[in-house]
């Protein structure tokens, strides 16, 4: 009994306390990462010295802490996936990944995480990788302060920056993604948090988001992406304090909401997008305290949306504030600030006394006949708008803000 | 001919209208810069001015000038000068002084604040519009001897091209909206100098992204060398055709 107890204590002591540190480098005893991974016991630490490591595909199946010193370069030589991880409790930090392979059947990634949990991927750099960080069927992963850069020329030659499929409890914090297909890709990812990321210049979406319930993204910046940000087929998403800037193009949206329910979109800024928010088939969402500034269309609210509340937003200097494709009004639009509002406020309660109809006649005409945009900025259009303002005929009469704010809200 | 042009030029300067026009454009452009430092916005506001005011001023001023210098023209024709050169010098003097005013009035502020590519297009289209409407005004002037009638006809030209035509176009688009209209609207737009100038200008600015498929189609066309050649030659046609017509009438007219 005591012998067994002693052996057990010894075992616990040796595995629990005596985690070894392995140093990998050209001048060290262990020259290859592969070798170190094979030698290391679960829980050991690998320190990678600066240098270039061309070791093909590294497969990691035990919990290790892998730290880079001065960003050692792991080169995929344009043909390999670099790290394939199938283990819990892994830490990867301070590494630089370059040149993964490009394949159309396998999703080659710089770091691929399969069915793992409690993994930390922090402070890494990625250059010219097909997929940057790829998570499948994983949970409780922390991805922080990574920098991903790619310069692909067409969509089929590049994968997503941070790609998540069927995961839960993931935190993505302070990453920078540039030049991938989708900056951040979420499919079947629940209960996760995306904060303070910067996704810019991606070919398709800055953030692509599907079937991912109960997630929250806040304080992110999505700029100059091919088609902006798409959030689809999801319920209970919270989007707070994000910036959507200059997603400009004939099919680009600041934020595309398709079949979104019970979500909260507040305190975001939509600046210079060809469409600020495009909503389709979405219901019971709360859109409040957002800033719409210099967009082509600030809000395109399709008639398939219902029970949305659009309140206390600032609409300034947009070409069209609001367009819709039907006359049925099922949404609440209230207490917004519209810079085109020309009403008055007799009792000085900072709320306009006459309702504001945000839909301009020309917006309606263009929505019905897209070719009519040709006459945009002509004298005729100017006259039509003025006439319709005075006496609404074509625009849905009930679509109005009954208590428009006289002054823009200060959200800062 | 050069001498007559010189006299007409002096005469134009004496009325001071050209100077007022330049000053008006200068003040407008500076004011837009004061209101909004963004070049894109300034160009858009100037576009509105260009599409409205430039044709109107050109058309009215040219007609009035033609009738005011009727006696001068009669005097000139009493000399051994042929009618063609008298008419051409009148035309060239008026058109060039108006376009000079436009270039100076809009261009100077941009030179001060820094020039920019769409501004060049704005200038060129503005000058083209000026010439087109001076041509139309001269055409209106030779049609009749009555000054008021001529001004009426000239204004009608302006009214037609800046308002009625667009209304008709909108009606066409509305009626045939079930059909692919890109090519048809392209040709219809090209038949109106103001619309043509507007489209060429708008495609220079990034508003064109709003225009969706239609915009992309137009951008493809007008962005190509062929498109530029096409729009320039159409505008030239709009300048030359009314002018030649007017000249022919003038040559045969009993003054």
Image (spheres, coloured by chain):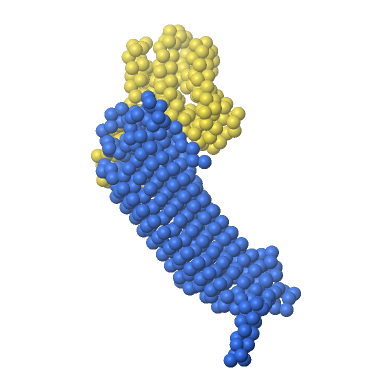
Chain colours: A blue, B yellow
Please tell me in which quadrant of the rendered image residue A347 appears. top left
Q: Nearer the viewer, residue A124 or A295?
A: A124
Residue A244 point in image, percent of width and height: 48, 48
Residue A205 point in image, percent of width and height: 46, 55
Q: Is residue A297 above or below residue B71?
A: below
Q: Is residue B48 above or below residue A284?
A: above
Q: At 56% across and 56% down in the image, what residue appears?
A: A174
Residue A242 point in image, percent of width and height: 49, 49
Report how many numbered discs are placed on residues in the image.
0
Q: At 38% across and 41% down in the image, what residue appears?
A: A311
A127 sits left or right of A309 in the view:
right
- The quadrant of the picture occupied by the C terminus of chain B is top left
Please tell me in which quadrant of the rendered image residue B50 appears. top left
Q: Nearer the viewer, residue A63 or B68?
A: A63
Residue B215 visible (yes or no): no
Residue A31 visible (yes or no): yes
A305 sits left or right of A295 in the view:
left
Q: At 65% across and 73% down in the image, what residue appears?
A: A46
Q: Nearer the viewer, residue B209 or A263?
A: A263
Residue A28 point in image, percent of width and height: 73, 76
């Amino acid at each position: 009994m005591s012998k067994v107890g002693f052996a057990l204590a010894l075992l616990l002591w040796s595995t629990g306390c005596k985690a070894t540190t392995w140093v990998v480098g050209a001048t060290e005893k262990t020259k290859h990462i592969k070798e170190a991974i094979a030698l290391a016991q679960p829980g050991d630490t690998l320190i990678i010295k600066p240098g270039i490591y061309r070791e093909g595909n590294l497969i990691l199946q035990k919990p290790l802490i892998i730290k880079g010193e001065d960003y050692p370069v792991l080169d995929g030589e344009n043909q390999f996936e670099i790290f394939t991880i199938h283990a819990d409790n892994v830490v990867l930090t301070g590494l630089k990944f370059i040149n993964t392979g490009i394949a159309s059947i396998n999703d080659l990634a710089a770091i691929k995480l399969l069915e793992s949990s409690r993994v930390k991927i922090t402070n890494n750099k990625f250059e010219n990788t097909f997929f940057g960080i790829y998570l499948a069927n994983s949970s409780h992963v922390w991805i922080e302060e990574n920098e991903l850069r790619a310069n692909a020329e067409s969509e089929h030659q590049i994968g997503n920056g941070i790609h998540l499929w069927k995961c839960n409890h993931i935190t993505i914090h302070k990453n920078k993604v540039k030049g991938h297909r989708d900056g951040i890709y979420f499919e079947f990812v629940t209960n996760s948090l995306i904060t303070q990321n910067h996704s810019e210049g991606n070919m398709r979406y800055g953030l692509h988001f599907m079937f991912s319930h109960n997630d929250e993204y806040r304080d992110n910046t999505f700029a100059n992406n091919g088609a902006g940000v798409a959030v689809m087929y999801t319920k209970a998403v919270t989007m707070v304090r994000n910036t959507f800037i200059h997603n400009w193009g004939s099919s680009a949206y600041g934020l595309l909401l398709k079949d979104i329910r019970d979500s909260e979109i507040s305190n975001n800024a939509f600046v210079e997008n060809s469409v600020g928010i495009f909503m389709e088939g979405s219901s019971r969402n709360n859109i409040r305290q957002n800033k719409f500034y210099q967009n082509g269309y600030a809000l395109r609210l399709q008639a398939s949306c219902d029970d949305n509340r659009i309140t206390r937003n600032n609409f300034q200097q947009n070409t069209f504030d609001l367009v819709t494709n039907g006359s049925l009004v099922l949404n609440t639009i209230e207490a917004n600030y519209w810079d085109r509002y020309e009403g008055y406020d007799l009792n000085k309660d900072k709320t306009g006394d006459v309702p504001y109809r945000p839909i301009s006649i020309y917006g309606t005409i263009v929505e019905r006949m897209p070719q009519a945009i040709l006459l945009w900025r002509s004298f005729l259009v100017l006259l039509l708008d003025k006439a319709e303002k005075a006496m609404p005929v074509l625009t849905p009469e009930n679509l109005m803000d009954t208590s428009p704010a006289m002054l823009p809200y200060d959200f800062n | 001919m050069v001498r007559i042009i010189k006299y007409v030029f002096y005469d134009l300067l004496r009325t001071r209208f050209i100077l007022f026009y330049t000053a008006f454009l200068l003040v407008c452009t500076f004011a837009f810069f004061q209101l909004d430092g963004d070049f894109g916005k300034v160009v858009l506001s100037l576009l509105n001015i260009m599409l409205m005011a430039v044709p109107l001023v050109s058309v009215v001023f040219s007609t009035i000038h033609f009738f005011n210098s009727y006696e001068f023209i009669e005097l000139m024709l009493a000399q051994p000068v042929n009618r063609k050169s008298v008419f051409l010098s009148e035309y060239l003097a008026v058109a060039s002084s108006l376009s000079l005013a436009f270039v100076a009035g809009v261009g100077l502020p941009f030179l001060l604040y820094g020039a920019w590519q769409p501004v060049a297009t704005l200038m060129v289209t503005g000058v083209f519009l000026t010439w087109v409407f001076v041509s139309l005004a001269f055409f209106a002037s030779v049609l009749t001897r009555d000054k008021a009638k001529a001004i009426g006809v000239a204004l009608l030209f302006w009214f037609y091209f800046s308002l009625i035509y667009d209304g008709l176009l909108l009606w066409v688009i509305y009626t045939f909206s079930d059909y692919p209209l890109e090519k048809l609207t392209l040709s219809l737009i090209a038949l109106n100098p103001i619309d043509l100038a507007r489209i060429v200008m708008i495609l220079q600015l990034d508003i064109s992204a709003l225009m969706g498929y239609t915009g992309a189609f137009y951008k493809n066309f007008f962005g190509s060398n062929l498109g530029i050649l096409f729009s320039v030659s159409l505008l030239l046609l709009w300048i030359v055709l009314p002018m030649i017509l007017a000249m022919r009438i003038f040559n045969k007219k009993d003054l």
